Image: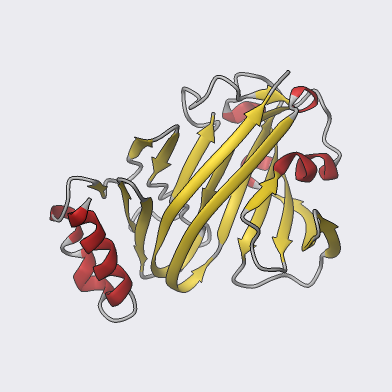
Amino acid sequence: MKSLAIVVSVLVLFSVLVPYLLFSTLHVVDDAIDCRDWARTSWNNYLLENNVWGDKSAEICSFKDDLAGWFWRKPFPSTHPIYPEIIYGKKPWLKHSTTPTLPIRIRELLSLTIEVDYTTIARGKYNVLIDIWITRSKEADPKSITAEIGIYLKLHEPPHDCELIEIDGHHYCYRVTRGGAGSKLYQFMLLDPPPERLDLVKFIKFTGLDGDLYVASVEFGNEVWWGYGVTIIKYFNVTAIDP
């Protein structure tokens, strides 16, 4: 834990000054760090993923110990972002779920909450995103994706073509657009300081999605179009309650 704390401290100190130099040494600093593309490692009841979807040349290094998180370096812009992340449930592109509770029908979900305490230090174009995949079937494979719900705790460039709404006393800019895998993307862009706890059922119900659809996964990460940075997760908890 001591060596990992040193690595994190060094990254925070040098993230603005020498990101290239730091990334050249990350691969050999500590066994708790994984810099492989698409690497997936378990942390508590969750799964860390080095998701380089939008740019295979980008570098992501995830780490885990008492803390967890990821570093990234993406020098050049791309049409689609990378998304270093932590996963709860069955992401449609994975074979297994991290929990027996998800996927679950929307109408059967009594409670779904997320609590996260994190720090992000970065330069470039990026956001902080809670992503929820909605599918037509319990198998929750890519073919069954019908919707994506994005809750943006930080957004690089908030759009102007959205509706001002309020959920649980917090204000969001809301719109529906085209998401991944040909699905609809329901976007909730937070305009207030991030709350420590979010009731995700309220966001799901706000969309008006059919109760027979399934909540497949809840994911938290950084969409990055270009730049470099670090996210340190001090506390992360997703709680799902079924009948």
Q: Residue at x 67, y 26 (%)?
A: 241
Instruction: Count all numbered tags in the image, as a single digit.
Output: 0
Residue at 20%, 59% in the rendered image: 26
**For residue 186, above or below residue 232:** above
Quadrant where the C terminus is found in the figure = top right
Q: Name the one closer to the observer, 108 or 115.
A: 115
Is 80 rendered above or below residue 146? below
**Residue 116 drawn at (x, y percent):** 54, 51
Q: Is residue 241 above or below residue 161?
A: above
> What residue is shown at x 64% (from left), y 19% (from top)?
138
- Residue at the extreme bottom: 17
- Coordinates of residue 220 in the picture (x, y in percent): 53, 48
Q: Is residue 217 among the parts visible in the rendering?
A: no
Q: Is residue 167 left or right of residue 141?
A: right
Q: Where is residue 150 drawn, in percent x and y?
A: 66, 50
Residue 41 found in image quarter: top left
Residue 18 image position (x, y, % from top left): 25, 77
Q: Look at the image and tell me whether residue 72 can be seen.
A: yes
